[in-house]
Amino acid sequence: MTQLQFTLTGNPENAPAMTRYMKNKFKFLGVKSVERKTQSKVLLQTSIKLDRQTLHAWIADLYQREAREYQYVAIDLATKNVRKWEFEDVIIFKNYIAQKSWWDSVDAWRTMFGKYIQRHPDEKQRVFELFFQSPNFWERRVAIDLQLMEKNNLDPEMLTQAILADQDTDEFFIQKAIGWALRQYSKTNPEWVSNFLATHKLRALAVREASKYL
């Protein structure tokens, strides 16, 4: 197995603002997104040639590191190699949702899962069921927003199921997710979303977010 030798070089002047933006939940090196992608470019290119076992080891290594930017690189690695993954890999990645959880990492992982189901549409239901009705609300956020990139391939029944399971949940990030999912689908099927809002009683936050493009 190839050993991971990778470090990010941050700008300490950026770190305090980045930490505050994430509600002081994580330590930052001060590496902004564009610079992180520049510094990790070779790593990501190299990763394409690696086997799945090594990739999982690298992702685990990065995810354990204290600085938040390393979690971002770990998710970048998983997303870069999405064409290699099988359902058993998705099960492993699901476990990261409950680790060092906040909207930034959860939504980045959701993007990776979304790309996976685009490549494996026959497995979308199985992926959805990994997160649906989880006791962890971050995992349920993934279930709600799993189909954000699906457009005409979105399964309305699946979306309805995810929303109704949490329609009365007080959690801010759940209500935002409901609104986000409906708003995104309204770009493809505004009539369906309008009808859904008219026939279901949702929280004000979700309705406000969902109605943005209607």
Image: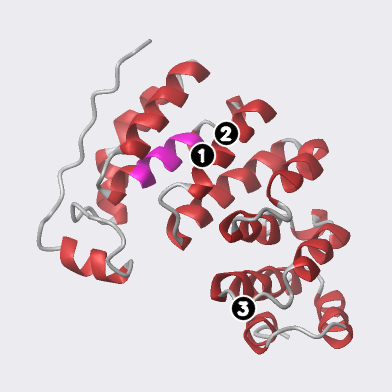
Going by the image, does 52 lie left or right of 211? Answer: left
Magenta extent: 71-79
Disc 3 to disc 1, C-alpha distance: 31 Å
Q: Amino acid at mark 1?
A: Thr
Q: Earlier in the sequence, mark 3 or mark 1?
A: 1
Going by the image, does 61 lie left or right of 106? Answer: left
Between 214 and 197, the residue placed more toward the observer is 197
* Placement of 169 over or under 79, stated as above or below: below
Looking at the image, how many numbered discs can be counted on the residues?
3
Occupied quadrant, residue 205 = bottom right
For mark 2, does the 10 Å Cα neighbourhood hold few (<14), some (14 to 19), or many (20 or more) residues? many
Secondary structure beneath dot 2 equals helix
For mark 3, does the 10 Å Cα neighbourhood hold few (<14), some (14 to 19), or many (20 or more) residues? few
Q: Which residue is mark 1?
A: 79
Nearer to us: label 3 or label 1: 3
The spot of residue 46 in percent (x, y) is 37, 23
Q: Which residue is mark 2?
A: 82
Nearer to us: label 2 or label 3: 3
Q: Is residue 86 visible?
A: no
Q: Amino acid at mark 3?
A: Asp
The spot of residue 28 in percent (x, y) is 22, 55
**Label pair 2/1, CB-CB below 8 angstroms:** yes
* Placement of 55 over or under 29, stated as above or below: above
Location of the N terminus by quadrant is top left
Numbered mark located on residue 170 in the image: 3
Going by the image, does 52 lie left or right of 129? Answer: left
Disc 2 to disc 1, C-alpha distance: 5 Å
Q: Amino acid at mark 2?
A: Val
What is the magenta segment's predominant secondary structure? helix
Q: Residue furthest front?
A: 135
The spot of residue 160 in percent (x, y) is 83, 66
Membership of 72 in magenta stretch: yes
